Image (cartoon, rainbow, N blue to C red):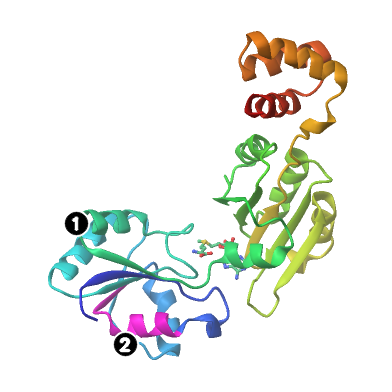
Amino acid sequence: MSESALYIVATPIGNLEDFTPRGIKTLSSVALIAAEDTRHSARLMAHFDIKTPMIAVHDHNERQQGQKIINSLAQGDSVALISDAGTPLISDPGFVIVREVRAAGYRVVPVPGCCAMVAALSAAGIASDRFAFEGFVPSKSQQRLNYYENLAAESRSLIFYESPHRIEASLEAIVTAFGADRPIVIAREITKTFETFLSGSAEEVLHQVQADHNQRKGEFVVIVQGAPQADASLLDADATRVLDILLEELSVKQASALASKITGVKKKVLYQAALEKKVD
Ligand code: SAM
């Protein structure tokens, strides 16, 4: 390796055959590997016969270890950052280090590979053109419910990470917040022996998970289909007339709010229609 750099290396999320040749080569050739959990990663290193020394980097020592990494880079050495599985920084440590290494003027190079949310979305059969990755949701039940409720009107597909001991309660909260009929997919143990994709309405998936304790084991990605977008073409003539008159005097926001009060049509539908009229 010519110029020293920090390499952000994605590792497998289950199936070791998913480790890329470039990822293996990078870990073998750097001077130091910063790993989330060195004991956990020791198995990966043994499997691929990688002998590079490791240091531990986790949420509580990122700043301090960042300085060690910068010192290595300053000596002309290259360093790799890995997490326990998948892509570092994606619901994993590393952001502070990447920011500080960049600020210190060194190259940061991605070595891409597995990422559970991308793998889940790629095979879920849920719209993948626009999505929001939310990572882990709050663990306390009321906070989690509020969190989901705030996302209920989001039209992009929503992606969450969930743990086995919370999956059932989390699905119950999804049914409450997004409605029993909202289509969802849960992707379990991706790339591993018991890989399973369950899909259907939120209520159907919850029942499948409740009925079979095996479906509560392992690691999960939960994908919730986005809320249907308001269809402005559904406005009737009366609502359109009211909106047109109000738009002559008021902003899009004010006109759609007032038109909603007058006509009883949903504010979101009127807002969308008002936006389209302004563009026309
Ligand atoms: N950095 C990782 C990535 O790129 O996906 C994610 C790390 S995060 C600490 C771990 C969470 O990712 C798990 O709790 C689970 O929600 C999800 N996950 C990781 N591996 C998975 C797999 N094989 N199948 C399903 N979900 C997985």
In magenta stretch: residue 225: no
Q: Where is mark 2, residue-wise?
A: 51
What secondary structure is marked by label 2? loop
The stretch of residues the image draws in magenta is: 21-34
Q: For residue 52, which numbered disc appears in the image?
A: none
Q: Residue at x 69, y 64 (%)?
A: 187
Q: Residue furthest left?
A: 75
What secondary structure is marked by label 1? loop
Image location of residue 18, percent across then percent down: 54, 81
133 to 6, vertically: above or below: above
Q: Residue furthest bottom?
A: 49
Q: Nearer the viewer, residue 270 or 25?
A: 270
Question: Which corner quadrant of the image does residue 234 belong to?
Answer: top right
Q: Nearer the viewer, residue 76 or 165?
A: 76
Is the stretch drawn in magenta largely helix, strand or loop? helix
Image location of residue 61, percent across then percent down: 30, 57
Q: Nearer the viewer, residue 168 or 146?
A: 146
> Left of 267 or right of it: where is 192?
left
Q: Residue at x 61, y 59 (%)?
A: 163
Q: Where is mark 1, residue-wise?
A: 104
46 to 166, vertically: above or below: below
Question: Which corner quadrant of the image does residue 154 belong to?
Answer: top right
Q: Nearer the viewer, residue 267 or 113?
A: 267
Q: Mark 1 belongs to which amino acid?
A: Ala
Q: Mark 2 belongs to which amino acid?
A: Lys
Instruction: Ligand 1: give its quadrant.
Output: bottom right
